[in-house]
Image (tube, grey):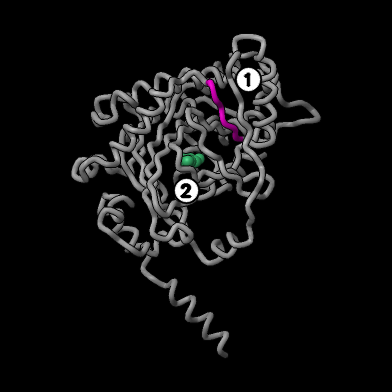
């Protein structure tokens, strides 16, 4: 009887008006930083992970794996083949690696991270103007894209710059505190994206321009994430486990750490490297490579004492241009290795991804043959 009472009590404690609390958080338009700035000492229930997830966390142990690091120095010379081999290996076994000597100057990276921080430090009244859940807006501020769909809200706010919306992207919509740094970063990250898609094409045994000719380098979406310090970091997450809705993601992070990648059933820390960038394969590249490259799950743990900034650039390809179908690349399939996925439209994939909770793997499975 006692045991049964406990169960009942337990179910009762989680019985609160979640929808209402989500809405009132959303209505503040101040994000998680707004809560922290207001001096909260307890995290609201909408951010607390369910007991089953918290219990699972206790059984996972620290891993000694090291995320691969690829040095891109000498790419136009005799190291090219070695670099291509390392990228192939990392993309097949990890789906994520770090690059150094990638050609983006350190001050461009630092100014981007600094600009992102300055955005989040802006006056709330200015940020509120940009607060929106409308994916058709190129420039917007929000907290938790999937706020109303996810099991648990993440301890994170985002400022996003996107070229996926229907109207052309207008740089003057970016607040001045981060406009120049963002534009300079976009120029550099697009160039690096081109290089990486060449290397990935070669790693797949295709001609260097193959992925570019498919449109993989077109269309991007940049997130400037701000992870405020959290009063109860063990009860929530900065970012829930997910894989990315992109061909490829290039992520710049500050030196705080917290990003983890799921490798061989363990969470492995992606330790920040000064001047380095994190590269991960997204769902679309897993599909078109017919599962040769892995779109790996990753997440961000919350931090107790300090805030963290990260800036992912998602290469998403054509989303609003003339509809273009993507599926496993013909050259990569054969009778012994038939296509695993059907052809799909990027817009179809993205609307499915963004209509549910981020990290819900069923999106990728929907496209399985
Ligand atoms: C993402 C993501 C990781 C990070 O935005 O998809 O995985 O370190 N971000 O912020
Ligand atoms: Ni991600």
Residue 96 in the image: state x and y as whole percent: 60, 35
Q: Secondary structure at mark 1?
A: helix
Q: Secondary structure at mark 2?
A: strand
Q: Residue at x 36, y 49 (%)?
A: 228
Q: Which residues are magenta?
A: 96-101
Q: Is residue 259 left or right of residue 141?
A: right
**Residue 225 highlighted magenta (yes or no):** no
Question: Outermost residue, bottom direction?
Answer: 1
Q: Which residue is mark 2?
A: 239
Quick one: 145 or 35, which is closer to the camera? 35
Residue 95 in the image: state x and y as whole percent: 62, 35
Q: Is residue 296 above or below residue 169?
A: below
Q: Which residue is mark 1?
A: 201
Q: Tell me the tag on residue 163.
A: none
Determine if the C-beta at disc 2 is less than 8 A from ligand 1.
Answer: yes
Residue 329 in the image: state x and y as whole percent: 65, 24
């Amino acid at each position: 009887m006692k045991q049964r009472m406990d169960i009942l009590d337990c179910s009762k404690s989680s019985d609160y008006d979640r929808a209402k609390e989500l809405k009132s958080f959303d209505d503040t338009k101040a994000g998680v930083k707004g809560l922290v700035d207001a001096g909260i000492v307890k995290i609201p229930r909408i951010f607390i992970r369910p007991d089953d997830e918290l219990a699972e966390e206790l059984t996972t142990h620290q891993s000694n794996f090291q995320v691969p690091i690829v040095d891109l120095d000498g790419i136009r010379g005799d190291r090219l083949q070695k670099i291509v081999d390392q990228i192939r290996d990392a993309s097949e076994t990890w789906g994520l690696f770090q690059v150094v000597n990638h050609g983006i100057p350190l001050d461009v990276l630092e100014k981007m991270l600094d600009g992102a921080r300055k955005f989040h430090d802006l006056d709330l009244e200015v940020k509120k103007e940009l607060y929106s859940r409308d994916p058709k807006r190129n420039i917007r501020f929000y907290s938790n894209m999937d706020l109303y769909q996810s099991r648990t809200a993440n301890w994170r706010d985002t400022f996003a710059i996107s070229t996926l919306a229907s109207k052309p992207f207008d740089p003057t919509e970016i607040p001045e505190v981060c406009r120049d740094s963002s534009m300079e970063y976009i120029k550099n990250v697009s160039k690096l994206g081109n290089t990486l898609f060449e290397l990935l094409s070669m790693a797949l045994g295709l001609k260097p321009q193959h992925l570019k000719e498919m449109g993989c380098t077109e269309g991007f979406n940049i997130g400037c994430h701000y992870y405020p310090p959290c009063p109860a970091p063990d009860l929530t997450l900065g970012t829930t486990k997910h894989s990315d809705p992109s061909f490829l993601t290039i992520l710049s992070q500050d030196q705080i750490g917290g990003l983890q990648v799921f490798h061989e059933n363990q969470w492995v820390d992606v330790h920040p490297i000064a001047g380095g960038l994190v590269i991960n394969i997204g769902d679309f590249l897993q599909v078109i490579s017919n599962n040769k490259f892995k779109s790996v799950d990753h997440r961000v743990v919350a931090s107790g004492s300090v805030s963290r900034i990260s800036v992912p650039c998602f290469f998403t390809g054509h989303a609003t241009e003339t509809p273009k179908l993507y599926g496993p690349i013909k050259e990569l399939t054969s009778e012994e290795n038939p296509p695993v996925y059907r052809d799909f439209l990027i817009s179809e994939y993205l609307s499915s991804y963004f209509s549910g909770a981020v990290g819900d793997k069923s999106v990728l499975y929907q496209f399985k043959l």
